[in-house]
Image (cartoon, rainbow, N blue to C red):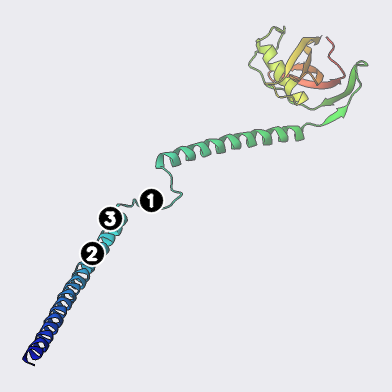
C-alpha cells in the first residue's frame, strides 16, 4: 500500500514537472516572438522613415538641379539670331523681287503696242510699241556703232532687245546684230531653250540711247 502511494506521488510530481517545463518553454518562445515583433516594428518603422526621407531628398535634388528651360520649344539665342538674320535676308530678297516685278509690270502696262506689217514669211507676228530709250553712257550724236561683243553699243542694244521682247536679259541669247539703216540696228535674239526667236528693230535717240521700235516674232531662227 505504501509502495502504491509512493508511485502515485512520483507520477504526480513527474507530471507537474513536465507541465512546468512545457509552460516555461512556451513562455520563453512567446517572449522571443514578442521581442522579434517589437524589433520588426521598431526597425521597420525607422526604415520607412529613412525611405521617406531619402525619397524627399531625391525629389528636392531633382527640383533644384532641373534646368529652367522656360519652354520646351525655346532655342539657343545664337540659333534664334541666325534664324532671324536668315528670315530678314529672305524678306529683303522677296521685297526686292516684288519691287522689280512691280516695276516690270508697270513698264509693261505703260507700253502700248499695235500690230505691224511682217517683213517676210518667217514672221509669225509683228508689232510696234512706244518703248522708251534705255539710256546711254555714250556721247551724242553717234556717228558709228560698235557691234562687237562687250562694247557699250552691244550692251545697250541687248538691254533694248530685252525690254521689247520681255526676255530676261540674263537668259537671253543674241544671235545676230547688224545695221538697219541710218543710226538703226536690227537684233535677232531668243531664249536660252531656243524655243522663242525675235527680230527687234532699234533706233538711236541722241542723248537718250537705243530705243526699240518694232518686234517680229519669228517662226524659226534665220541669220
Closer to the camera, 136 or 9? Answer: 9
Whether residue 90 is visible here, answered yes or no, is: yes
Contact, mark 2 vs mark 3 (Cβ under 8 Å): no
Task: Tell me residue 22's x, y (percent).
Answer: 16, 79
Q: Quadrant of residue 28?
A: bottom left
Q: Decide if residue 65 is on the left or right side of residue 85.
A: left
Q: Which residue does the numbered mark 2 point to in the structure image?
A: 47
Establish if 220 lies above or below 68. above
Q: Quadrant of residue 47?
A: bottom left
Residue extending farthest front: 1
Tell me the residue at 15%/82% (across/down).
19
Q: Quadrant of residue 171?
A: top right
Q: Quadrant of the N terminus?
A: bottom left
- Separation of disc 3 and disc 1 at Cα? 17 Å
Q: Quadrant of the C terminus?
A: top right
Res. 69 mark: 1
Tell me the residue at 12%/85% (across/down).
11
Which numbered disc, 2 or 3, marks the residue closer to the eye?
2
Task: Tell me residue 192's x, y (percent).
Answer: 73, 19
Q: Earlier in the sequence, mark 2 or mark 3?
A: 2
SS of the residue under disc 1: loop
Q: Which residue does the numbered mark 3 point to in the structure image?
A: 61
- Separation of disc 2 and disc 1 at Cα? 36 Å
SS of the residue under disc 3: helix
Tell me the residue at 13%/78% (across/down).
21
Amino acid at each position: 500500500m505504501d509502495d502504491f502511494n509512493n508511485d502515485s506521488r512520483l507520477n504526480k510530481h513527474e507530471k507537474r514537472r513536465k507541465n512546468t517545463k512545457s509552460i516555461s518553454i512556451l513562455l520563453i518562445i512567446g517572449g522571443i516572438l514578442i521581442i522579434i515583433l517589437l524589433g520588426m516594428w521598431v526597425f521597420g518603422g525607422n526604415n520607412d522613415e529613412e525611405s521617406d526621407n531619402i525619397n524627399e531628398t531625391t525629389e528636392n535634388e531633382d527640383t533644384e538641379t532641373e534646368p529652367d528651360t522656360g519652354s520646351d520649344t525655346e532655342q539657343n539665342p545664337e540659333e534664334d539670331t541666325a534664324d532671324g538674320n536668315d528670315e530678314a535676308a529672305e524678306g529683303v530678297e522677296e521685297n526686292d523681287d516684288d519691287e522689280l516685278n512691280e516695276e516690270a509690270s508697270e513698264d509693261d502696262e505703260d507700253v502700248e503696242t499695235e500690230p505691224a506689217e511682217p517683213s517676210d514669211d518667217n514672221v509669225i507676228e509683228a508689232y510696234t510699241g512706244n518703248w522708251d530709250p534705255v539710256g546711254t553712257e555714250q556721247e551724242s550724236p553717234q556717228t558709228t556703232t560698235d557691234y562687237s561683243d562687250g562694247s557699250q553699243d552691244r550692251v545697250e542694244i541687248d538691254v533694248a532687245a530685252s525690254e521689247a521682247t520681255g526676255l530676261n536679259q540674263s537668259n537671253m541669247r543674241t544671235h545676230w546684230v547688224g545695221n538697219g539703216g541710218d543710226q538703226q540696228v536690227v537684233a535677232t535674239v531668243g531664249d536660252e531653250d531656243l524655243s522663242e526667236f525675235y527680230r527687234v528693230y532699234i533706233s538711236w535717240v541722241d542723248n537718250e540711247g537705243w530705243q526699240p521700235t518694232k518686234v517680229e516674232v519669228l517662226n524659226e531662227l534665220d541669220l
